[in-house]
Image (tube, rainbow, N blue to C red):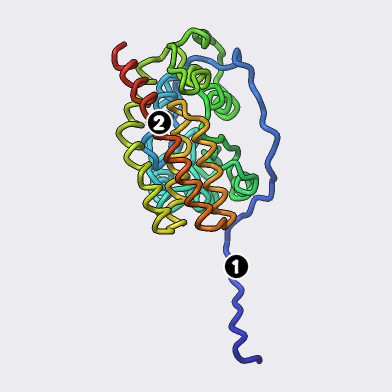
Amino acid sequence: MKWGGGTSFKVVLPYQIYTEEVKAEKTITQLDIPNDFSGFTILMVEDNVMNRKYLGKLLEKKNIQFEVAVDGLEAIRMVQQKKYDLILMDIQMPNMNGYEATLSIRNTQNHNRETPVIALTASAMLDQKNKAYQVGMNDYISKPFTPQQLFEKLVIYLNPASVDNKEEDSKLHLAYNEALDAEFLAELYGMDFDYALSMFQSFAQDIMPEIPKLSLLAEQADLSALGKLAHQIKPTMAMIGLTALEKKLQSLEEAIHNKETVSGIKSRVTEIVQYFESKKEAVLSQLKRLESL
């Protein structure tokens, strides 16, 4: 025995590991998506208020019943109480993340061991998507996603019996502020101005106050907290037409993951905050325009 070498332990966990790699995504044409998904109940596991509101509105439009868990621990309790037709599972959450929750669902006695689980991931990194399959998830949707992308997944996993699609013309839409990504906003909201208003109001109330915290965390060199905050607010940027800012936050998150220097991180954060300040008036102007309709 060599002193100072430490002690090795071997632990065997009774969990099934899935080895399937990321698959090519199946696509559905828009005509294949029905207007009514009545009779289905979904469990939404999501800690972000704005993401819950966005997703909930989409499900309501298709007459889908849904219940909400704000983290993995709450999801574990809920799957033991009733059967769901589908679980939409966020990845990064406090208390218990989506990977851990899915492993528990797949490997413990509950009503949903075979229920399809779709990951909601704000990460573009392939290893995280592969991990989703390895823990037993069936598929993933990358945030931010459009209504069409979500509804395609619902068709695949819920398999509604009939198709009666009369979707609104997405070319008819509010003239969004030209300083924002008007084309993407039109794809998200179409003619549903109340929906757009709800999301802009939620952004102003819940997300705007978080943005100055990026600078504070960067100055404190608290890169762990900075990365978590960037990940949390990143997908909400596209929902109000700041798609370029969403990409900047993605780059910041990757830079932290790749252990870029603190000075480099601070420079990125300064650029992000300055960019948002340059677009802030356009966001507030768009909010006022929606409120006036």
Disc marking residue 169: none
Picture coordinates of residue 79, whole percent (x, y): 43, 44
Residue at 60%, 41% in the rendered image? 124
- Of labels 1 and 2, earlier in sequence is 1
Picture coordinates of residue 123, whole percent (x, y): 56, 43
Displayed quadrant of residue 140: top right
Mark 1 neighbour density, 10 Å: few (under 14) some (14–19) many (20 or more) = few
Eyeballing the image, is 271 above or below 60? below
Q: Secondary structure at mark 2?
A: strand
Question: Answer yes or no: do the residues labelled 1 and 2 have beta carbons within 8 Å?
Answer: no
- The answer, for residue 117, to whether it is visible in the render is no
Residue nearest the viewer, comparing 105 with 110: 105
Picture coordinates of residue 205, whole percent (x, y): 30, 33
Q: Secondary structure at mark 1?
A: loop
- The residue carrying mark 2 is 66
Displayed quadrant of residue 78: top left
- The residue carrying mark 1 is 12
* Residue 289 as seen in the image, left or right of residue 159: left
- The answer, for residue 182, to whether it is visible in the render is yes
**Circle 2: residue type:** Phe
Residue nearest the viewer, comparing 215 with 71: 215
Picture coordinates of residue 143, whole percent (x, y): 52, 35
Displayed quadrant of residue 204: top left
Eyeballing the image, is 276 above or below 152? below
**Circle 1: residue type:** Val
Residue at 29%, 13% in the rendered image? 292
